[in-house]
Amino acid sequence: MIAHRTIVALGFKVSGLLVGVLATVACVFLTIEAIWFHHAAAPDGSHLISVRTYGLIGLMNDAAVGIDRVFGVLAGLAAWLFAALAVVALFVVVWAGLLYLVGRGVGRQAAWARIVGGGIALIMALANLLALTSLPDDKMDLPPLLLLGVSLYTLWTLIWRFNEPSVAALPPVAGTPTEIPPE
């Protein structure tokens, strides 16, 4: 029989690993894209040429340079957006690391992990209760209701079942050897 504390610890560790791996991949991808768009935003050094000297060709060249500068500004904005999203993904990686460490701490009966995990579960319970009451359609009540149940189970475990033993000792079954016979 697995204790409730072990289930909660495993939940924190698995969610920390899943979120952490996905956020790390997103952070790397967004950083690469931000660098690429930053290079695309750099001006190419083209100069405007005289329309009087070159006529229609000069006008077309000046229009192309102007369009290039507009796209350079848009690429610069995209680079800033990707960089901001990469920073957000980095914060999510740190959050996932905290979730994983809380899971390890709960598994080892650390008091700090009990407090931090309880705070996280309480915030999740309140957020899911808010989502449950604010969603307009009755069909969308199931996901917040399930997450509210998981959050309340986590709180119940961390408050009332935290100090129970990890593995319940089973009584020996009659007729089974308790030691391995020597050969």
Image (cartoon, rainbow, N blue to C red):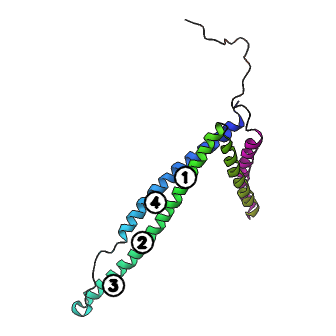
Q: What residue type is labelled 3?
A: Ala
Per the image, the residue denoted by label 1 is 94
Sequence-first tag of 3 and 1? 3
Image coords of residue 62 (percent x, y): 30, 85
Q: Of circles 1 and 4, which is in front?
A: 1
Q: What residue type is labelled 2?
A: Gly
Kind of element beneath mark 3: helix
Kind of element beneath mark 4: helix
State the extent of the magenta-drawn residues as a range. Answer: 135-162
Sequence-first tag of 3 and 4? 4
- Whether residue 19 sits left or right of residue 170 in the image: it is left
Q: Mark 2 Cα within 10 Å, few/some/many (few <14, many 20+)?
A: some
Q: Which mark, residue 30?
A: 4
Camera-nearest residue between 57 and 168: 168
Image coords of residue 16 (percent x, y): 58, 47
Per the image, the residue denoted by label 2 is 76
Residue at the spot 32% in from the left edge and 81% down from the top edge = 65
Sequence-first tag of 2 and 3? 3
Q: Which amino acid does label 4 sit on?
A: Leu
Per the image, the residue denoted by label 3 is 63
